[in-house]
Amino acid sequence: MNMENNPTHFNHEEWLNSFFRFAETARQFFQEALKGLKALSQKGFIGAWREIRAAATRLTPQDFLISGLITFTGFVGGLIFTLGLGLFSYQAILWLQDGVWTEFPLFAVFNFLFANTALHQWLIQPESWMGLQKLVTWVLQSTPLSLALIVPGFSIALTMAGTFALALLLRFNQLKNRND
């Protein structure tokens, strides 16, 4: 029986040649596409850089002051977030070592910040507003300090990043459309 005339026989050499032709064509296509993208992005970056430089020369001291304040506030938010994450990591390490979760309630910070104040005295021995005292005590004792740092810190940092980006885009658009 002759296998060369059998139509069901798979020709490996022909398949490999087809595959290598396809691979070479794909390589050439991606190489040319990469060259085109590189040229377009360079033209785009050069044009964008020219516009940014033209707009930056018209920035006022108020622009720098406001962007500095926004950046500083975002940095403080990021620092608060990082502190909360660090405290949570510290608690997790202690838990991995001992198998017991070490609690750091918000009440400890409240006691530190408001020691010997009228608010602290009211919280310890209330003479009125007993329900509010119970509610505030419960919140301070049940809220973990790490969570009380992570959530607002992340919120502040994210809000300031969005505010900075929006302010930058709006100011750039104002300066670009201004005729002077």
Image (cartoon, helix red, strand yellow):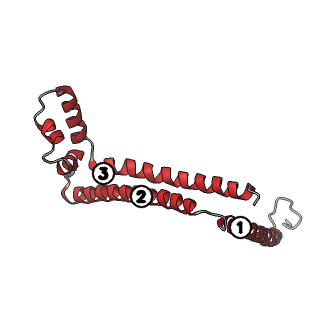
Name the N-terminal-most of marks 3 and 2.
Answer: 2
Foreground of the two, 122 or 109: 122
* Residue at x 23%, y 41% (from the top left corner): 140
Q: Residues within 10 Å of mark 3 (few under 14, many from 20)?
A: many
Q: Is residue 95 above or below residue 122?
A: below
Q: Amino acid at mark 2?
A: Gly
Residue at image mark 1: 54
Q: Nearer the viewer, mark 3 or mark 1?
A: 1
Residue at image mark 2: 78
Q: Quadrant of the N terminus?
A: bottom right
Residue at image mark 3: 146
Describe the element under mark 2 as helix, strand or loop: helix
Describe the element under mark 3 as helix, strand or loop: helix
Foreground of the two, 169 or 45: 169
Q: Residues within 10 Å of mark 1 (few under 14, many from 20)?
A: some
Q: Position of residue 42 (x, y in %)?
A: 75, 71
* Residue at x 83%, y 71% (from the top left corner): 21
- Between the C-alphas of marks 3 and 2, the distance is 14 Å
Q: Amino acid at mark 3?
A: Ser
Residue 58 as seen in the image, left or right of residue 14: left
Q: Quadrant of residue 20?
A: bottom right
Q: Quadrant of residue 124?
A: top left
Q: Position of residue 51 (x, y in %)?
A: 72, 65
* Residue at x 55%, y 55% (from the top left corner): 164
Q: Quadrant of the C terminus?
A: bottom right
